[in-house]
Image: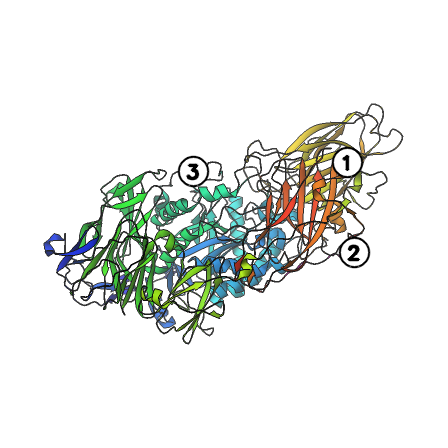
Amino acid sequence: MRLKTSRDEASNATLLQDSKRSINALGSAEKGKATLEAVDSKSLQSHMLSLSGPTSSRFPRRRGSSWVLFVIFSVLCVLVSPVRRSSILSPASHLDFSRAEQVDMLAGMDFTGNGRTTDVLWDKYSLIIRGQRVFIHSGEFHTFRLPVPGLWLDILQKVKAAGFNAISVYSHMALINPSPGVVDFNDYRALQPLYEAAKQTGIWIVLRPGPYINAETTAGGIAHWITSEVAGEMRTNATDWHAAWQDYVQGIITETAPYQVTQGGPVIAIQIDNEYSQEPATHAEYFRKLEAVYLNSSIVVPLTANDPGEGWAWVNGTGAVNIYGMDSYPQGFDCSNPDVWSPVITDYYSYHMTVDPGQPWYFPEFQGGSFDAWGPTAPGYDQCRILTGVDFENVFNLHLWASNAKLINYYMLYGGTSWGALPFPGVYTSYDYGSAIAENRELTVKYPELKRQGLFLRSSPDFYKTDWVGNGTGGMVSVSNPAAFVTLLRNPDSAASFYIARQSNSTTTDVTTFKLNVTTSAGNFEVPRFTSGITLGGRQSKIIVTDYPFGSSSKVLYSTAQVLFAGQIGGRDVLFLYGDPTYESEVALTLSGTPRIQGAELSSVSSNGVTTVTFLPGIQGLITIWDSSEQLVLYSDTNTAGTFWSPEIPANDSVEFANYWQFGTNSSILVGGPYLVRNATISGSTLALRGDLNDSVQLTVIAPDDVKTVTWNGIPISSDVTAVLNLTAQGGFVAQLKPSSMVLGFAPPALTDWRYADSLPEIRSGFSDANWTLANHTTTNIPFKPYYGDGRVLYGCDYEYCENIVLWRGHFNATENTQSVNFSINGGEAFAATVWVNDVFLNTSYGNSTNNQNILEETDDKFYFPPESLFYERENIITILQDNMGLNESGSVVDEEKSPRGVRGFMLNTGDFGEWKVQGKVGGYTNYLDKVRGVLNEGGLYGERMGWHLPGFDTSSWALRDLSEGLPNATAGVGFFVTTFNLSIPDGFDVPMSFMFDDTSQPYRSQLYVNGWMMGKRVSNLGPQYKFPVQQGILDYNGTNTVAVALWAMEPKAVSPTLQLTIEGVYEGGVGGIETNNPPWSPEGRS
């Protein structure tokens, strides 16, 4: 739908009003001091914009600092030139907008919509949400990888604190639709708690419900029952596939419709399936049918798609969506050499202009980390956090901005845990992803850079609407050094310009210094004007702004220093700049009002105009450049800037979208020092800050000047008056924050007093499998047929046992000529299967992976029967203990998700098998017992079937045996080790914990259960994971906790695993109120 108007688009902007100004001096610096020199206006290349300047005064000198500041104030001649105040759709920073203004402005614009709502529109620049132009700055978060709904608020607060305004969320069909006709949105599968938390924090949501989601999860998220019960090709217009996803999608609609933005909720768009090609026609028809279900429902927000590359998919034709998006992972997924980069992708913008120039440029997934694979050479997530670390974020994120993208989602922002059977075979339990927020929810070294970027975007509404003007390649941007590459974006209404600079060779670590020719309202000239140049310190990008407005009426003519914050606080225009402490930078801006504080060694004259401030190397910490009743200008080094927060001050609850920036609020403050600032409120003269501390810090606050009292987590704080006087004369607050002594007092309990029981009675003489499932199918919907056998199909999913450990028992009669058996076993990458005849160990088949190389997802081995292992006069039984590592994701082979997990071939060297029996988790996917933890939590081990992993199971009659002793008599088999421990952690503390196995290579596998949840799969012979974070809510911070380890010794050798509980950090704060939901053992169904 197009909304058309007869009004000229130029009417969208209103004019800023500014008085005529003049200047008469230009400053220059000598070492150790600042001087003023007269300058003729002819020294400028052209007329310059009139801006307000300082009044004459002498500033006090700052003493006792470890840095040396050289600052030059230069007052430049200007002539009158109008300044344009941005409109509601390109708003001036931090202004309040009424609904009436939005409606009026919409009437004059030419936007595109889906014909179902005007609350989400778009043009070629960006989204327009309820009349506001919005840059969607988003991070990926999967709630199913954090199965504690109370902690979702913790993640969303950390997302918001970094300046993000949105998240992208997959929902998991296999968990929500575990069996035909069952749709379960209870507990961690719920969407409502997420939507409520998003409203509470002011975060938009792009929902991505699939049904296929990829996400390195089993079957790409498709419900396991579908992989065996649907004969037609999945993700096509096949009739049975179409019927299979109906219940799930209708459930998504029911849960989501009341939480669309049109209903005051956070959901602004829904993605159709995931990373799929539009050809052949069956794909397109599938998309069309999926879209039709949404279009015939109460869902009115736009539908989107994510093209996995430059494939032109879903732009036009059958199945086309409202808004096209493209995913990009420029560094790939191997973190083995984290210092070796692939270069930036240079055709983003040209591709966008070819494919969808009339829409905003959307990246549903841009690399925010990487998954990691099984194997002894797998690098681990710490290496991924280097490969996609601070330098990568700085260079590649800003390069994405330079392509004029205005809807960006970083995958992942918080990865979480692929607990239970969530992973697909290519990844292990941890889904940390090398993200900015670690698996255990701690903030990592990547977080501050994202926060610097996020606060810049929030502060820069003129950046939401920019034309791509050009770069050095086309001659539109001129630099003095070809080693620098600069792209120019310009707001067509305000003329604010953004020069985004990087190295021409984006992988180089060289230092490059250059000067840049800029076009401003004051004319064309080269910047910087007084320092030697703009410096890129190796892998680095910078944004040079010109004609950049901040606050209600102030303006930066140009700045080679970076902008952290720009806006209004308490009626003052506030600007916070930062730069490298080893390189120079400078800013030219208006300074207005009578200064009370000014940076060291500065002078000024009583004239109006533009002031140039030069920052020479050596600046560390925060300094005040200008402090008047009208303006506050601050500067710091980059690291110090990363310690600052800018929590938004929400409107009262009666205001719609009270917590959303640009909608309910445009007020924020600055807070420096704490580990995390979660939120801030002002009531009367009291500013209440809530956040987390892990160390003593100096708290620095810039707030409205009517704030007289500051509290931290409810406790009043005394201000350091002397320190405040060096910061600002109004609205400033400085104090020392110190966590309680309890932060140092936590020690993890030792895991002792283990109880042991054998968990493989299936190989004992006399074990009865009479109640097991008879494996007698001779047909299967799984397209990968058995290799050999007698026609029976031994695939676990065909018998409802799709995940985790499955046991097979084959009955046969032997003769003296029976010598061996052949098995082809399919378990997925990194699987294992151990085989016994009667009670005699035969061997173990190993799947393999070496960092996704040498992959074996199935084996074909011959097992020889040792002497005296067979009975000639009675029945013999083969027992296969097989680990299912998850179902494959979509690939080049059709229906690869229908993975043939099980026995693909069985053959005795002579004779035939009788019955085959199979056992997985109790009840299969139809009647599984644990409805809270869900269908993917348990497998078929005897101990699991009996519920030994659940809290409350009585192990008092079991033998005392330490885990480190392994299985008795160094046998191959499976044993359960169970112990309990107590925690007593007071409210108001967040204490991330992990369970850490030995970091050795031994022939064992183990499954870790904490209070009944399978929180880790340790494969000691492959690795790399040996540490398993477990969250509060799974852990009971104030009670008894049960930990169980199912130890599978794969060889008749002694294994000696160890396990300890570790504390990763202690944070005073947290979100509080975390509930546990760990149903205890019950005998029902467990006998």
Q: Residue at label 2? A: 1083
Label ID, residue 339: 3
Mark 1 crowdedness (10 Å alpha carbons): few <14, some 14-19, many ≥20: few
Observer able to see residue 268? no
Residue at 14% across, 54% down: 46
Q: Position of residue 540 (x, y in %)?
A: 35, 44
Q: What residue type is disc 1 on?
A: Asn
Query: Is 702 rendered above or below residue 930?
Result: below
Instruction: For marks 1 and 2, give the CA distance.
Output: 31 Å
Circle 2 — which element? Answer: loop
Which stretch is magenta? 1076-1085
Q: What residue type is disc 2 on?
A: Pro
Q: Residue at label 1? A: 969
Mark 2 crowdedness (10 Å alpha carbons): few <14, some 14-19, many ≥20: few
Residue at 45% across, 63% down: 737
Q: Position of residue 367 (x, y in %)?
A: 45, 46
Q: Nearer the viewer, residue 670 or 847?
A: 670
Instruction: For marks 3 and 1, give the CA distance.
Output: 47 Å
Circle 1 — which element? Answer: helix
